[in-house]
Amino acid sequence: MDDDRVRATETSIRMLEGLIDLDGEAGITELATHLSVAKSTVYKHLNTLESSGLAVKHGDRYRIGLRALEFGGYAQRYDGVYDTARPQLRKMADETGELANLMFEEDDWGVYVHTSRGENAVEIDTQTGRRAYLHATGLGKAILATLPEERVEEIIDARGLPAVTEHTITEPRALFEELDEIDATGIAYDREECVEGMACIARPLSTPSERPAAISITGPVSRVSTGETEESIRTVLEQAGNVIELNLTG
């Protein structure tokens, strides 16, 4: 372990992650069992988190507190990309009827920052703050295609190329070949590589921020990956991306 890390802080973070794992709510015994930690340790850390508003107690069970939104809201907004992209994602969702997403890369993960749902959008887990493997999503591959090869190799070393579905790219050579194609066309695809039956068409964003970002439209393969529909989605992505980039640099 890095000597600069504080074990108590790491343990508190594990408590919050454990609450998420347990559908957002758990009692002390349940959380202790899930994390293989002593109940006394769980009790102390949850009390500390509760005193700061990061956890709240309901009866004998704990949940993540709304104070967490304060931190998450700042993380979303500090470089202006989120606020600039949000109305365009709403427009993308309205025009396509599908799910429109914004993702940033952070700590070698793809992080969903905002989602807008069209009238026909399918419910999948793109909750704000959710992390995903970059190689397994259209958004993530769009981001990877903008990065230097050595940075992509660092991400592969850190997170690997696990198979999220049977369609996920798991070989570095195949991934780099696809990233070259994305770099040439400006469009990335995910064909059931993250969720069975779902497809994603994504576009990287060129912004002044140091955080790599991309936008996408996600929907069932039968709707998103068909001829004219796919072409219209690409047009929607290109128009929205242009507006976001112009507003950020104008």
Image (cartoon, grey):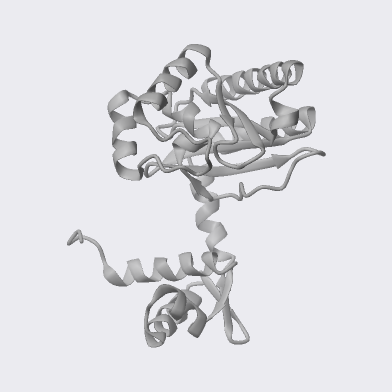
Q: Residue at x 59, y 65 (%)?
A: 66
Q: Position of residue 27 (x, y in %)?
A: 54, 82
| Quadrant assignment, res 4 | bottom left
Q: Is residue 198 visible?
A: yes
105 displayed left or right of 234: left
* Total numbered circles: 0
Q: Give the quarter of the figure containing the N terminus.
A: bottom left
Q: Is residue 217 above or below residue 52?
A: above
Q: Residue at x 51, y 80 (%)?
A: 30
98 displayed left or right of 198: right
**Residue that lies at the very extreme toward the left in this rendered image:** 3
Q: Residue at x 35, y 25 (%)?
A: 173
110 displayed left or right of 160: right
**Residue that lies at the very extreme toward the right in this rendered image:** 119
Q: Give the quarter of the figure containing the C terminus.
A: top right
Q: Position of residue 248 (x, y in %)?
A: 54, 25
| Quadrant assignment, res 138 | top right
Q: Residue at x 50, y 56 (%)?
A: 71
Q: Is residue 179 above or below residue 111?
A: above
Q: Position of residue 143 (x, y in %)?
A: 46, 29
**Residue that lies at the very extreme toward the top in this rendered image:** 184
Out of 112 and 77, give the one closest to the viewer.
112
Q: Position of residue 48 (x, y in %)?
A: 43, 78
